[in-house]
């Protein structure tokens, strides 16, 4: 039982712990293209205004920066680009494409070049599928407001995100995302690259369809088995390598990548209230709409996308309170990656959720003062946790039920408790005690290691 819950804890903290750096996927000559499709590429020219977002262009039509190709035997599948043949008919050009446009109908050696590029694309897709995963089904595929470090992440169903998703690493760090279902990027969602992470080292292997919502911005190399759809105003920095169709609705595909940062005009969202000395340095509080007390949200990328209420001196440390939607009392959530993605039902008491992190990740319950201390405590906790509880490393992760004052103070105690769990004061103090329990315990019980 304990091994199961420990494994669950490792999944929860993956966004703050780097795995062994995988080898990058070799794209071969497929890497020469911003878009490469086996079946066809279509663009529409509906007028769409895109304003204020980092890396986006203000335009009413699609634009591709980089080479584009389809291995279809005719140019007909490339519609909407008003193609013009080169003098030797080895490629075409378009006012919508900064680069060369190729198809199998062009003169030699273009058809053989495309055969090789598509073969390389298929090989790269297979290699991405075969990579050994470090994490499986992290957060059930909901990557909203998450921070990923280098490694191989696998999901057996659909993956989606809204708000933002951050890839953090050095210029040599590699990220491989294996998605057996669809990939759905919500309208307005952003992918951020921090620490020097490069779009060319982020590989999205998608078995299902891929849909990029309106005004979304993503980074990486997409190896997609089925269709890719870029809705109005969406932008990709990287490459779209698809085994079927690619459709652009007034979208932008840029082969060369830039790392978006939060512009001063976007730093605070509508309704944000920021106290004196809060939101430092300038990389913190990006698009935050929260009410933030004096001296709160201090740390690189702290409180990005936060929407709750944060007390004075709360949320200190790198990534602290990113995407937090709950209530954070004064002096709470201190340490790197603490209180990330708090739900709207979370209520964090004073001086709680403090440690080297991640603590209180995606917590949803009421956490009393001076609770959830140590490393890796109270992640995904939905329990009602009273003051002075869950004070040792790994305690109260994925917990439900009721935890009275001074309870669950053993290392890795009260992990995975059920909705009927009720620990009276001073209960479950032994190491690994009360894990997976759905029982009620009187005061002072379960003090030995591995008890209850």
Image (cartoon, rainbow, N blue to C red):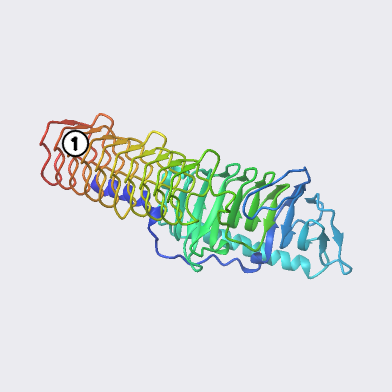
- Position of 440 relative to 169 (above/below): above
Residue 300 horizontal/vertical position (percent): 44, 57
Res 180 visible: no
Identify residue for label 1.
405
How many numbered circles does the render carry? Answer: 1
The quarter of the rendered structure image containing the N terminus is top left
Q: Nearer the viewer, residue 142 or 217?
A: 217
Residue 48 horizontal/vertical position (percent): 73, 43
Residue 261 horizontal/vertical position (percent): 56, 56
Residue 386: image quadrant is top left
| Residue furthest to the right | 87
Q: Nearer the viewer, residue 173 or 22?
A: 173
How dense is the environment of label 1, judged by Cα within 10 Å: few (below 14), some, or many (20 and up)? many
Horizontal side of residue 136 vs 39, given as left or right: left
Q: Nearer the viewer, residue 63 or 406?
A: 406
The quarter of the rendered structure image containing the C terminus is top left
Q: Nearer the viewer, residue 176 or 320?
A: 320
Residue 400: image quadrant is top left
| Residue furthest to the front | 276
Residue 336 horizontal/vertical position (percent): 36, 55
Res 449 visible: yes
x 73%, y 57%: residue? 64
Dot 1: what SS? loop
């Amino acid at each position: 039982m304990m091994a199961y819950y420990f494994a669950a804890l490792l999944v929860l903290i993956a966004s703050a712990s780097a795995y062994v750096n995988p080898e990058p996927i070799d794209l071969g000559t497929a890497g020469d293209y911003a878009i490469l499709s086996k079946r066809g590429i279509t663009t529409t020219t509906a007028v769409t205004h895109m304003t204020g977002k980092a890396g986006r262009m203000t335009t009413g039509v699609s634009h591709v920066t980089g080479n584009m190709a389809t291995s279809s035997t005719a140019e007909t599948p490339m519609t909407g680009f008003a193609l013009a043949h080169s003098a030797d008919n080895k490629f075409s050009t378009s006012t919508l494409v900064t680069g060369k446009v190729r198809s199998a109908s062009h003169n030699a050696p273009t058809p053989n070049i495309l055969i090789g590029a598509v073969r390389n694309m298929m090989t790269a897709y297979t290699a991405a599928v075969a990579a050994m995963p470090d994490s499986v089904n992290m957060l059930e595929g909901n990557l909203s407001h998450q921070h990923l470090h280098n490694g191989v992440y696998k999901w057996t169903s659909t993956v989606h995100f809204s708000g933002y998703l951050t890839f953090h690493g050095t210029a040599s760090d590699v990220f491989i995302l294996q998605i057996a279902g669809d990939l759905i990027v919500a309208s307005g969602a952003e992918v951020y690259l921090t620490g020097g992470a490069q779009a060319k080292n982020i590989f999205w292997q998608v078995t299902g369809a891929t849909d990029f919502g309106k005004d979304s911005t993503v980074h990486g190399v997409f190896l997609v088995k089925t269709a890719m759809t870029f809705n109005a105003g969406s932008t990709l920095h990287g490459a779209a390598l698809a085994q079927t169709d690619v459709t652009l609705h007034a979208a932008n595909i840029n082969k060369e990548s830039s790392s978006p940062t939060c512009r001063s005009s976007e730093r605070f969202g509508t309704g944000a209230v920021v106290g004196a000395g809060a939101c430092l340095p300038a990389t913190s509080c990006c698009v935050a709409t929260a009410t933030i007390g004096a001296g709160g949200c201090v740390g690189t990328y702290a409180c990005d996308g936060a929407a709750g209420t944060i007390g004075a001196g709360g949320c200190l440390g790198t990534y602290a309170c990113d995407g937090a939607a709950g209530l954070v009392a004064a002096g709470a959530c201190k340490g790197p990656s603490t209180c990330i993605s708090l739900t709207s039902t979370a209520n964090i008491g004073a001086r709680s959720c403090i440690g080297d992190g991640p603590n209180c990740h995606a917590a949803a319950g009421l956490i009393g003062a001076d609770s959830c201390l140590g490393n890796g405590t109270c992640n995904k906790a939905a329990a009602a946790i009273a003051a002075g509880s869950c004070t040792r490393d790994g305690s109260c992760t994925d917990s439900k039920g009721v935890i009275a004052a001074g309870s669950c103070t053993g290392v890795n105690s009260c992990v995975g408790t059920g909705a009927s769990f009720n620990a009276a004061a001073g209960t479950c103090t032994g190491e690994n005690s009360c894990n997976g329990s759905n029982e009620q315990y009187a005061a002072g019980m379960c003090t030995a290691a591995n008890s209850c």
